[in-house]
Amino acid sequence: MKTLIAAALAATAMAVALPAAAQPGPQHGYPGGGSDVLHLQGLKVDHAKAQLASAGYNKARNINSGGRQYDLWSNARARESCVGFTSFNGTVTDVRSFSDAECGVVSGGWGQGGFRSSSLQGLWVDDAKRNLRNFSYTHERNIRIDGQQWDLWESSRGRDCIGFTSYNGRVTGTREFRQGECDGDWNSGGWGGGWIRPEQLRGLSVDDAKRELSRSGFDKARNVRIDGRQWDLWFDDRGRDGACIGFTSYNGRVTDARNFSARDCY
């Protein structure tokens, strides 16, 4: 009997010990993160900051997410380019990845054709401007297209022109522009013959539109009213039939421009 009791106690001890031995140690970091900087959970805040700094991260900002305050750190060269942690009583309680836009950084901004304007999407405007400067872009001017204001920036190499539009301080749209649109020299970029395309006038002030038309060899022809809108028609008599361009405006800005037949300008 004693032998049976001893065997039963030993079996029970093994059953209790095996699950305990199989349990993993303390788990740090964000599930599936796979990056050392995400394995900060449970560390003291000062130790976590030192570890981030040693990994090449810089403090970006603090944000509130899900009712908790996160310290965001960024490293544009890292796989996890924007990470953040929250803490309680001086100890890190959660750490996870955030989007580049939350940290205000552009990672991998260069594409095959140059800087990717889409990298700015969602950034705060101030962050977008800082990143553009970091990539050697300078602000040239603002233009208005289809009711939206665009900030145009040109690369130091003078070949790339990109712009962004924004709402409530956030970048909402980005795209590439022609170099001539950045510096206002609408005849640059190989249009040929010095002729100007109507779409190049949209968003300009009326005075700038008239100046560009005049520089391109157009003379004021007349004003016409079409569908309730007033159009300024300009004519260039070069070529077999010449060219007639018209624009309409509101509050001193060109809102639309298009080609007309030559006889419309007569």
Image (spheres, helix red, strand yellow):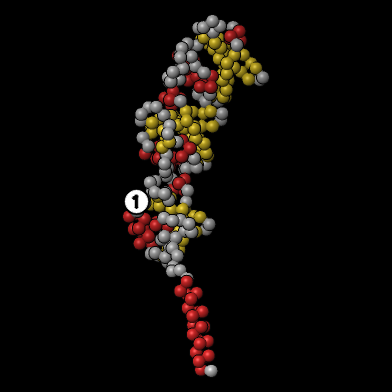
Q: Nearer the viewer, residue 179 or 34?
A: 34
Q: Residue 37 location in percent, x, y? A: 40, 56
Furthest-right residue in view? Answer: 227
Residue 78 visible in rendering: yes
Q: Nearer the viewer, residue 259 or 21?
A: 21
Furthest-bottom residue in view? Answer: 1
Q: Against 5, is 91 above or below?
A: above
Q: Secondary structure at mark 1?
A: loop
The residue located at (42%, 19%) in the rendering is 188
Q: How many marks?
A: 1
The residue located at (35%, 30%) in the rendering is 156
Residue 60 visible in rendering: no
Q: Residue 257 location in percent, x, y? A: 56, 20
Q: Against 53, is 153 above or below?
A: above
Q: Decide: few, some or many residues near mark 1? Use Cα within 10 Å; few <14, some 14-19, many ≥20.
A: few
Q: Residue 78 location in percent, x, y? A: 39, 49
The residue located at (52%, 58%) in the rendering is 67
Q: Residue 43 location in percent, x, y? A: 39, 64
Quadrant in the picture for residue 34: bottom left
Q: Nearer the viewer, residue 99 or 59?
A: 99
Classify the position of the C terminus by image quarter: top right
Q: Against 26, is 227 above or below?
A: above
Q: Against 197, is 132 above or below?
A: below
Quadrant in the picture for residue 70: bottom left
Task: Please name the amino acid that badge 1 sits on.
Answer: Gly
Q: Which residue is mark 1?
A: 56
Furthest-left residue in view? Answer: 54
